[in-house]
């Protein structure tokens, strides 16, 4: 899977982790208000859309060293 579509896991409170190894784009509010606790972004990630992780339960985020296009409020709470 190359793209997580917008709102895909929104309000998925039971979701604690997810494998994003091959994901290039994370859609708008795709994990908003989810139970996601840790996030490890892959070397393939290029774009994170608006409020992708807003109001989630994230406590740890790991990301690659290359440039990523991030829209507004990706971690907004």
Image (spheres, helix red, strand yellow):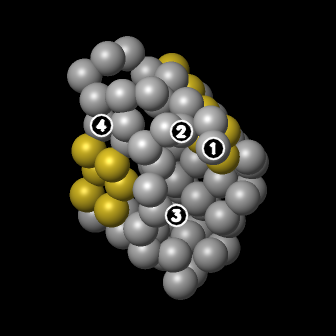
Q: Secondary structure at mark 3?
A: loop
CB-based contact (under 8 Å), mark 2 and mark 1: yes
Crowd tier of the residue under label 2, counting other residues whose Cα lies within 10 Å: few below 14, some 14–19, many 20 or above:
some
Badge 1 density bin: few <14, some 14–19, many ≥20, Cα 10 Å:
few
Q: Residues within 10 Å of mark 4 (few under 14, many from 20)?
A: few
The residue wearing badge 3 is 55
Task: Estimate the spatial distance between the alpha carbons at disc 3 and disc 1, rounded to whole Å.
Answer: 24 Å
Instruction: Indicate the secondary structure of the residue bearing disc 1.
Output: loop
Upstream in the sequence, badge 4 or badge 3? 3
Q: Nearer the viewer, mark 4 or mark 3?
A: 4
Residue 53 position in % (x across, y down): 52, 53
Residue 19 occupies quadrant: bottom left
Q: Identify the mark nearer the N-term, 2 or 1.
A: 1
Q: Is residue 24 visible?
A: yes
In the image, is residue 62 above or below residue 25?
A: below
Mark positioned earlier in the residue sequence (4 or 1): 1
Q: Label 4: which residue?
A: 63
Report whether 72 appears left or right of 17: right
C-alpha span from label 2 to label 1: 6 Å
Nearer the camera: disc 4 or disc 1: 1
Which residue occupies 67% across, 65% down? 10
User: Which residue matches tag 1?
Assistant: 1
């Amino acid at each position: 899977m190359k793209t997580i579509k917008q709102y895909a896991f929104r309000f998925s409170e039971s979701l604690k982790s997810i494998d994003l190894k091959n994901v290039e784009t994370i859609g708008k509010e795709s994990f908003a208000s989810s139970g996601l606790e840790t996030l490890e972004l892959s070397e393939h990630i290029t774009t994170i859309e608006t409020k992708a992780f807003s109001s989630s339960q994230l406590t740890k985020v790991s990301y690659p060293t290359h440039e990523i296009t991030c829209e507004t409020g990706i971690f907004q709470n």
